[in-house]
Amino acid sequence: MILVAKIIMAAAALLVEQSQTPSIIVERKPCLGECPVYRFQVSASGGMFEGRRFTNVHGEQPFSITPKEWSTFQSALAPHRPQGTETITVGMRGADSLPRIMLQSR
């Protein structure tokens, strides 16, 4: 019984640690044409790309990232990055001729 409790506590601590890991989510929404539609989430520990439409790869594809790549990516987005869990949306709502790009920081 004590072993089960320790396992549960360790799993809970890992979930809290993972939820506090900063990540960046970029999502490109559809347009009326053949714009690529995808979503990816990346953090210092790696990421997940999901190709939805008009991409070379479809479905979820995990990828790795080096600490230097993560730092470079964060620096490039820093001037545009939202605070906290705020979402920045570029483009118009709904399907139109311009795709929407969402940037979310967690």
Image (cartoon, helix red, strand yellow):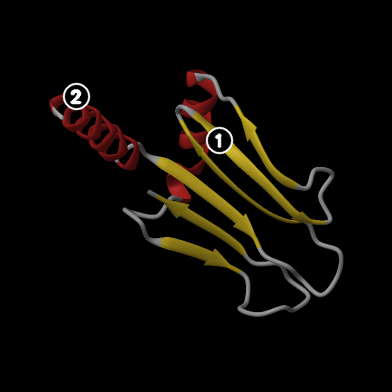
SS for dot 1: strand
Q: For residue 4, which quarter of the picture? A: top left
Q: Compared to 82, does 67 lie above or below? A: above
Q: Disc 2 marks which amino acid?
A: Leu
Left of 95 or right of it: where is 40? left
- As drawn, the residue found furthest toward the left would be 2
Q: Residue at x 62, y 71 (%)?
A: 91
Q: Disc 1 marks which amino acid?
A: Gly
Mark toward the start of the polypeptide (2 vs 1): 2
Report x, y in % for residue 6.
18, 27
- Looking at the image, do the residues carrying marks 2 and 1 touch, with CB atoms under 8 Å apart? no
Report x, y in % for residue 44.
45, 28
Q: Residues within 10 Å of mark 1 (few under 14, many from 20)?
A: some
Compute the Cα span from label 2 to label 1: 32 Å
Mark closer to the observer (2, 1): 2
Q: Residue at x 55, y 60 (%)?
A: 102
Question: In the drawing, what numbered circle is on residue 47?
Answer: 1
Q: Compared to 26, does 99 lie above or below? A: below
- As drawn, the residue found furthest toward the front would be 1
Q: Nearer the viewer, residue 83 or 8?
A: 8
Left of 98 or right of it: where is 105? left
Q: Residue at x 74, y 79 (%)?
A: 96
SS for dot 2: helix
Question: In the drawing, what numbered circle is on residue 3?
Answer: 2
Q: Residue at x 80, y 43 (%)?
A: 57
On-image quarter of the N terminus: top left
Q: For residue 93, which quarter of the picture? A: bottom right
Report x, y in % for residue 10.
23, 29
